[in-house]
Image (spheres, helix red, strand yellow):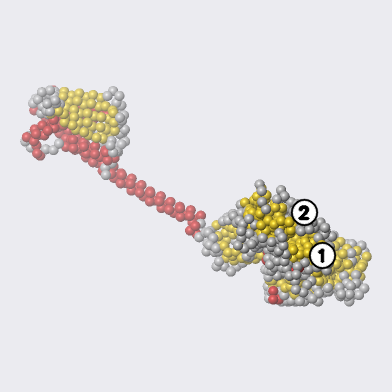
Amino acid sequence: MLRHQYISLLLFIAIHGVNGFSQSPNYQLETFGTRNGLLSSKIHALAQTSDRRLWVGVESGVSVFDGYSFTNYQYTSANETIGRVLCITEDSMKGVWIGGDKGLFYFNGDSIQKIELQNKTLLAVEALLTDIQGNIWVGDINALYKLRVQLVHQVHTDQLTTIPLYPFASFNKRVYGLTADNEHNIYVGSYDGVFKIPFNADRYEKFWANPDPYLFVRSVAAVSPDSIFWNCLDGHPAQMILGKVSSTYTEDFIGRTVFRYRESVFALTTSGVGIVKNGIVEPLVSLKGVTNNAVAALVDAEENIWVGSWEGLQKFRKIPFRQYVLQHDSHTETFSFLERKNGDLLFGSNRGIIFTKDKETLLPDKKIPTLFPHAEVMCMYEDNTGGLWAGSGYQGISRFKNNKLTNWVDTGFLTDNNCEALFPSTDGKLFACTENGVTVIDPMATFPMTAHYPFQKKYSRPPELLGCFKTSNSGYWFYGSQGLYTLSNGQLVDDSIWNMPVKNLYISKIIDDKKGNVWIATQGKGMLQCHYENGKLVLQKQYDQRNGLPSDIALSVLADKNDNIWWGDYMSLSVLINPGRNEQLITFNEKDGLLSSYYQSLKLEQQQDGTIWGLTSMGVISFHPDHIGLNSLPPVLLINSVAVSRDSKNFSTVLSPQFSYKQNSLQFRFTAICLTDPFKVRYAYRVKELDSNWTYTANRVIDLNFLQPGSYTFELKASNNNNVWVASPLQYKFIIRPPFWQTWWFRIMALLTVATFIYFIFRRRVRDVRSKAAVKQQLAELEAKAIRAQMNPHFIFNSLNAIQECIVTEKVDAAYDYLSRFSRLLRLVLDNSDKNFIPLSAELETIRLYLSLESLRFSQSFAYTIEADEKLEKEDIYIPSLLLQPFVENAIWHGLINKEGEKKLWLQFSEKEGKLECVIEDNGVGRAKAAEIKKGKLGAGKLESKGTKLALQRIAILNQQNPGSATIETKDLFDGMGNAAGTRVVITLSSHLSAKTKIIHD
């Protein structure tokens, strides 16, 4: 966007032919002296470096001016005096060389150091020049030296202070001036003439011989080999064009120096500064009354003219505005303007006086009488017959025609004596805008006042009606201090602007441009850009202080010949270039040549040739928009210093500095070099990582406080006095290091430390858990073994009792059979004694052997049945070993043995919903009867049935490890009469148990 604006401004300048000395513009003087910070008021040399700063060589050193203030250097870095500075040049690496009566000096960024010669020759330097190849030519009082570019680089990079330097081609004359032409030939001014050193040659030749060596050649300027200029001491500027020498003699125009700017040559004389054209010095600025001791001059990059004298530094700035003062003893006010058909320019003032322009002054027009005895001439109009009509502030309307003055006051349709505007209608009549409404005037009628249109609305205080605007469909709007009015049925009816919240605007003036935009100047709401739509004015854009205007007051508005929009307030003028498309808003004030006094009124009027006149209560200004010399150069932006909290060092030249987390507040000081008007420079800044929008300011100091650790880019841009912005922002990158506890390596180390700690804690916990689990497993296994160890002797004891009974009763065959089966059972029990779980098939075999033994023991007094579902995977289903035997034993010993009659025992095995169901059912006497029988036996109180108790403990241990994996339910059975009919034990086991299942006991 900035680039487009910059290009459009360049086009505007190119099209309208500004920024050239051919226009002979006016100049405004500004003087700088020691009270402004200049080191000394006695100036000897001037130079501008590539950063646009102005270097001023004075009697005791050098001053550097950035437009705001002077930076002074009186001593070198070694504390040596610099002395009188007579010449300054900049090398190809932006180092600055300084010459004077104390020798040769070099400035490289922050300090000045003296350059000594190896042969100890003392220098007194009067001229310096940097040629196209980067060599430095040094003009001494005794010789000419050539400091070759390689040596310049060594001074710049290695900071050499002692160099080998010898006279060039044995040139042993005093050198006063040095210059180069477009073909890079060098010219030397000395006491006996001008010498030429051809490009790349190691020789010199005489170019012009001085007939009077006493009047030495103090300066030389060259454009081409055929166009050379010089100036001798107290002589007149001379030139050689195509080998012909000429000089123009003017008694009061003695030359001081000649210098070149671009393709033009300028001369500083005792009278001023002028441009040399065709052997004549055409004056540009005058030094009369300013100084008699001008010594040096230059034209800077923005085309300001600077003069160094023994009375200080003078700056002459081009201004486009010309000021006029009415040639009258008591009147300075101007209220109206009229360009007559014969080309005369009339200016209406107070007391009815009409002034006219005579050359460059405004004089009372002797052909026109005083139109009003006391009142102001507020407006003027010339009718088709040459009659001059005028409206006054309070004395009615006058007409001057055929040398006869007629005045109408409070007569007929003229109901008010105030008339701010006379506006011609399409039918040849005039609308006279008064405080009571509009009076219609027919200039051709005997009685001109033919009608009156009053306000429809009644006002306690009549509004001022300031003007009329004709719409595109030949309608009319009237406007004034109370807003906008339309003409309807012979009355002025209130109207308003769509999209504008304020209805009763103070409207100073309304105009339209060639694009159809309607521009409304208001007092309080700035400038309004509108368009005409369906009989209404619609607001498009508002220009006020938010757009960069100095105020929200617009006293008048005008569209110039180029369709740019001008308006003004009580102290400035603004122009909007190319409205709506790459538009550029520029403001001018007293520093640009406007009136320095505040004025109460302003009207902008335009001549047929495009000249614009500003009529004020304090005088008159004029200008032509095509001759406005806009400054097209964007400023050069410099960061002067970067200060960091807790550090006094200047970090502005440090590349990508890094600061600690404690140094998180930075202060930037910067300058945009715009010597034309530095106080109109605007700045914009942002921290790229924190802000997407720019912050605009006029301050040159920015503080960034309490920045978090991270990488940052500070971006800065600036615009010149005519709102031309730099093409790209200046960037300053820096890093704020985080505290060590926020660094990545610390976080990784901390993370690793925590992870290691957690790992070892976890490992220790796992080890402890495993150790504890192992102990618990060992305890559970030992407990299970102990239970089995208690269970197995119990069974063996019962079995041996049965064998003993068979032997005692002499049942030998039964004893042998019993013993055989018992051995097999004992073998199975021993094999499974160290196993927590065994296959169902092994458990079934153990139960069959056990039941056969018990059946044999009780002489087959009971019958038993073992039923297993064919779908059961007996080899894959595991149950705790010897879990069923105690319940089978209880069923036989306590249920069946005590029963009379048929005795039966059923064992059923099936799988239901993933669980193994074992049912042990008998038709014995039941648990209650068995308990009574047991209680009645001798010694029953001392005997304890341990089998079922141990089995229940094993089930409890199994459920602790695998909750819900085993249940035992015992139920008493009854017949239809309610008598005990046996007992049923249902053991439910998970079918997912395996041989590897562990029993862990808490």
Q: Which residue does the numbered mark 1 point to in the structure image?
A: 404
Q: Nearer the viewer, residue 766 or 926?
A: 926
Give the CA distance from mark 2 to mark 1: 22 Å
Compared to 541, does 642 lie above or below?
below
Number of residue marks: 2
Residue displayed at 72% across by 66% down: 395
Local SS, label 2: loop
Q: Residue flagged by tag 2: what amino acid is it?
A: Gly
Local SS, label 1: strand
Q: Nearer the viewer, residue 113 or 841?
A: 113
Residue displayed at 77% across by 67% down: 371
**Are the residues flagged by discs 2 and 1 in contact, CB closer than 8 Å?**
no
Q: Quarter-wise, where is residue 308 in the image?
A: bottom right
Q: Quarter-wise, where is residue 954 in the image?
A: top left
Q: Which residue does the numbered mark 2 point to in the structure image?
A: 428
Q: How many residues crowd mark 1 within 10 Å: few (<14), some (14–19), many (20+)?
A: few
Q: Position of residue 710 (x, y in %)?
A: 55, 57
